[in-house]
Amino acid sequence: MNKSTHLHSPDDPPELPNPESVLRQFFGFRAFRKPQGEIIRHVCDGKHAMVVMPTGMGKSLCYQIPALLLQPGTRGLVLVLSPLIALMQDQVDSLKIRGVDAAFINSSLGREQRVQRYAEVAEGKYRLLYVTPERFRKSEFREVLENRDISLLAVDEAHCVSQWGHDFRPDYSRLAEIRNWLHEPTTIALTATATAECRADIYRQLGIPAEEIKLFHEGIDRPNLKLDVREVWSETDKLDVIESTLSDEEYSGGSVIIYFSLIKTLERFSDALLSRSIDHVNYHGDLPRDKRRRIQTAFMSGKADVVLATNAFGMGVDKEDIRIVIHAETPGSIESYYQEIGRAGRDGNPSQCLWLYDQNDLMTQMQFIEWANPDADFYSRVLTLLSEHPEECRGFGLDWMNDRLQRVSRHDHRLATAISMLDRQGVIAGSRPPECFQIISQVPDMFRDDKFLADKKRRDQERLYGMVELASEQSDRKAFLNRYFLGADEDHS
């Protein structure tokens, strides 16, 4: 990014917009939180940044303000790579209310909407554009961007870049290629959760030498959050603790999220809580999209105070008065736990984060790890079925494939993982029938590399063990979290 042609720098004449005036005009804040202003000036000077900042502390302003500083009449664009459609939808809706010229392009758009949006971007409309990294597979999208000058590339939820991150997205691993295609724009990577090892991998995946990207690390401490772990031995224990926590006057007057790992457990607890006259709504991935949207809207508006949810709920939920976050089942990693408790107390008021620790829950997470990590032999058998029995696959579907791949349990989800991974690497034509039965490209070596796949599984197991260590921590759990995330990293100036 060339500051002389695109973004206003701190040395511009006073009559030109500056970060502080834009902050006041569009967002109504009188001053930046430390170190937002420093980060914004850093990227406006054309320098790369890695931002690790607690959830809810304003990471998005670090790329939204630069977009608003783009000089009128240029074809500059701040491009934001975001992993979730719901997340970008909420951000764009919020920005439009503030008068910010922003848009998104993703699979939620119909064909006519998408074509129109492409045309608008090509014509120079929008200062801020949100897309998923998968969008770069589309040649028509790449053609549209050839008409724009990418002033800043923002990689949101940057832990998805790293294969060691807790939410690895394979298309994020193509960022070095994407940056190269975009002519190496100034880049800002942002996350609330990245260990030192994960950050090093992010630098590598971005194709930016570590010494050329400055780390802004604000730690992970949220002073107003009270972190409690309560050991329990049965579902009745959990229900009793949930009921007493919801009646605690110290945390009354706000909203509550109760997280579950399994939908069937969520539904069982829902019935039990209703029998105790505790009103709530349920949110999970098996609900139709329009129903999920209605539930989220009811929660955000305050019409529903308590939501029982799987981890499908939360990304993009920016509600200030969440007073209580309860984990009724053990999360799979410190990263997931921290992301989810980070939704509490964004207004700065005291908030309770309670984890109900039952050792039996670890078995559920260990099963998730097995399902999320098929080995090379499993991938080989999936690809053999697709290549040698295409008619049967198309005719009888994924259940037929699953029956032939394993006999242990019809609830084994390794096939869903394999299909998703093969789709994201461009090996098959899509993630759903019938597209998922069509092989369209060569198979990357990663699917044949037992060591690579075993390392990924081992890292997942280590993250789960981190939760066991957190549960057994007897002194300061916030200090434990800081040690986990900070590690030994240097501030690359």
Image (cartoon, rainbow, N blue to C red):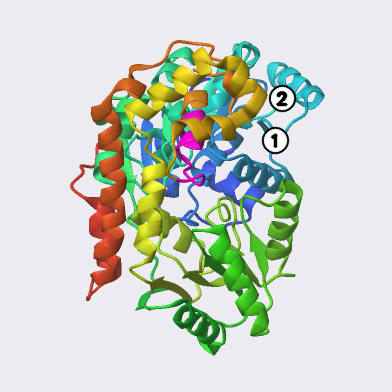
Say if 59 sits above or below 467 in the image: above
Q: Which residues are magenta?
A: 409-420
Q: Are marks 1 and 2 in contact (CB under 8 Å)?
A: yes
**Does the rendering let one see residue 104?**
yes
Disc 2 marks which residue?
A: 125
Q: Dot 2: what SS?
A: loop
Say if 163 sits above or below 465 in the image: above
Front in this rendered view, residue 114 or 358: 358
- Where is residue 309 shown, x and y percent of the image? 58, 61
Quadrant in the picture for the C terminus: top left
Front in this rendered view, residue 69 or 247: 247
Question: Label 2 neighbourhood size at 10 Å, few (<14), some (14-19), many (20+)?
Answer: some
Corner quadrant of residue 391: top right
Q: Amino acid at mark 1?
A: Asp
Residues at marks 1 and 2, CA–CA distance in whole angstroms: 8 Å
Based on the picture, tell me whether residue 166 belongs to the magenta stretch.
no
What residue is drawn where x is 71% and y is 20%? 118
Q: Dot 1: what SS?
A: loop
Disc 1 marks which residue?
A: 101
- Where is residue 203 shown, x and y percent of the image? 31, 30
Corner quadrant of residue 330: bottom left
Say if 267 sits above or below 466 in the image: below
454 lies left or right of 156: left
Say if 239 sits above or below 373 in the image: below
**Does the rendering let one see residue 200?**
no
